[in-house]
Amino acid sequence: MSTVPPPCRPDEPSDRSSSPTAHEQSAAVTDDPIGTQAPARRITDPDEAIAALERAVPELLPHRRPEPAVLDWAVIEDGLGITLPSDYKRLAEWYPTFVLGDFLLVAFPDPGEEHDWLRGIRNELEGTVQAWWEADMSIGLRPHPAPGGLLPWAESNEGDKLLWTTDGTDPRQWPVTVASRNGGWWHYEGGAVQFLAEYCDGGLEPWGLPPVGRDVILL
């Protein structure tokens, strides 16, 4: 794992309800992220990324569907005007929506309910993500569909959000952008599923995030 620049990680309080650190406040005000982390090797094969997540979270494997679900991605992608990363789509086909460590919600569309999922994403873009932009709290990144805009894909029960920065024409190369509830933002130069694997197995520094447990709850 490499970091760019060398991490200036804020001290993480034992109680996350405490005030943001000075570093996190500065990052929010100056539109500067905490930094960028990169895996030793970016995994671009969806099945390899899912296998890494299943190794990191063995409790997930019993919930794997016998056969991948058939999801109408065209409805979602046409509605968003963009193609989603293949690792995320493959994970959604093998697994229903789940919560990691009673903390991190990774939500997927259900078969036949793609319009509902799309509506929820649009509400998030027009609500929280737009509000960040208008308040100068999104490190200069606009909501999707602005070029290179932010597109949410997971969130914690404490208000942290995981998003893609939809930069470039190849969704496999989109970085994950972490928006901590304490105000610290940072980037991870790997895919969503690889991020989850490395977050759970300790392969990355969870700047502004608490450690996550490996228990799994299906929703």
Image: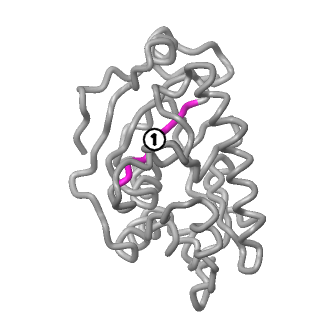
- Could you tell me which quadrant the N terminus lies in? top left
In the image, residue 147 above or below residue 36? below
Residue 142 position, x and y percent, is 52, 35
Residue 194 position, x and y percent, is 39, 59
Q: Residue at x 47, y 52 (%)?
A: 200
Q: Is residue 175 magenta?
A: yes
Residue 39 position, x and y percent, is 27, 50
Instruction: Identify the amino acid type marked 1.
Output: Thr
Corner quadrant of residue 47: bottom left
In the image, residue 198 above or below residue 32? below
Element assignment for label 1: strand
Q: On the image, numbered disc 1 is attached to which residue?
A: 177
* The magenta segment: 174-180
Q: Residue at x 57, y 70 (%)?
A: 60
| Front residue (pair 36, 77) | 77
Q: Is 121 on the left or on the right of 208, as rendered?
A: right
Q: Is 115 on the left or on the right of 164, as rendered?
A: right
Q: Residue at x 60, y 51 (%)?
A: 154
Corner quadrant of residue 87: bottom left
